[in-house]
Image (tube, rainbow, N blue to C red):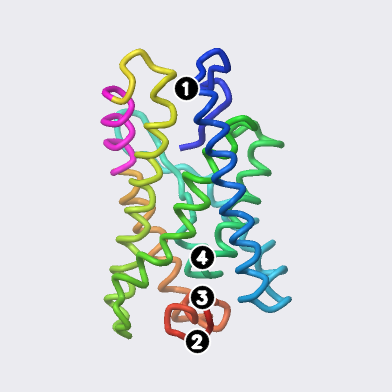
Amino acid sequence: MHISDGLINPQNPANLATAVIMWLVSIAFLAWSWKKAKSTYSSSITALLAISSAFVFAAQILNFPIAFGTSGHLVGGTFLAVLLGPYAAILSMTIVLLMQAFFFADGGIVAFGMNVFNMAIIGGLSFFLIKLFMRKSDSKSRFAASVFAASFLSVILGAFVTSLEIAPAFAGGVAVTVPSMLFYHALIGLGEGAITTALVTSLQRLQPTVMNGLALLKGRGKL
């Protein structure tokens, strides 16, 4: 889902304008997340933020086969949202994307605003999908189903937005990018949902005290 700078044609005004707009939108969300995180979390969140970012960074290196020779990897936005809460999840995922863009050329600097929105922001805000699906229920099965659904939908929505952003780079425009992105990312989303649900339910069982996002879902904290 990473967009490289090669897909952003500076000679195409619409393409360049989209990149600039997404930078501004992402900066606004990051500023909001930072402000909310400072008022929501204790100082101990710094260490957890670093550890969780490192974990997702490593997890994204591991690819799994899908179909037609393609592969996908864990995005991790929903996982971070349950682990840290929505605001720290957005910040943590942005750290991951920043390291990937600067040190591994995975995603571009011009396209960085797009990548932050598509993965960090959409992934972090999937927390509220889980909250909506849970409807104050304490059922573990409902929680697992909510995590799976939110993970899947975050991948699909991120892929859809990505397909709109990169459409100017292709001759067929959205008629080419939207079906292709949604088809393959529907498969990726199933893998994302399964992996995220397995990780989250395991942590819920073994180390529930480290899951600040779970505490927020249960109303033990302010949003």
Q: Is 126 placed above or below 185 here?
A: below
The amino acid type found where label 2 is placed reads Arg
The N terminus, quarter of image = top left
Q: Nearer the viewer, residue 142 or 136?
A: 136
| Mark 1 burial class by Cα count in 10 Å: few <14, some 14-19, many 20+ | some
The circle on residue 14 is 1
Front label number (1 vs 3) = 1
Q: Which residue is mark 3?
A: 223
Q: Secondary structure at mark 2?
A: loop
First in sequence: mark 3 vs mark 4: 4
Q: Amino acid at mark 4?
A: Pro
- Stretch of the chain drawn in magenta: 175-186
Camera-nearest residue between 148 and 70: 148
- Is 53 left or right of 196, judged from the image as shown? right
Residue 220: give its label.
2
x then y, percent, for residue 19: 54, 31
* Label whose residue precedes the other's in the sequence (4 or 2): 4
Q: Is residue 123 magenta?
A: no
User: On the image, numbered disc 4 is attached to which residue?
Assistant: 86
Label 2 CA crowd tier, 10 Å (few <14, some 14–19, many 20+): few
Image spot of residue 86 (x, y percent): 51, 65
C-alpha span from label 2 to label 3: 10 Å
- Estimate the spatial distance between the alpha carbons at disc 1 and disc 4, rounded to whole Å: 31 Å
Label 3's element? loop
- Which of discs 2 and 3 lies nearer the camera? The answer is 3
The amino acid pointed to by label 3 is Leu
Question: Residue at image x 35%, y 29%?
Answer: 69
- Looking at the rendered structure, the kind of residue marked 1 is Ala
> Residue drawn at (61%, 44%), measured in percent from left and top?
97
Q: Tell me which label, 1 or 4, sits earlier in the chain.
A: 1
At a point 32% along the width and 53% down the height, the residue shown is: 153
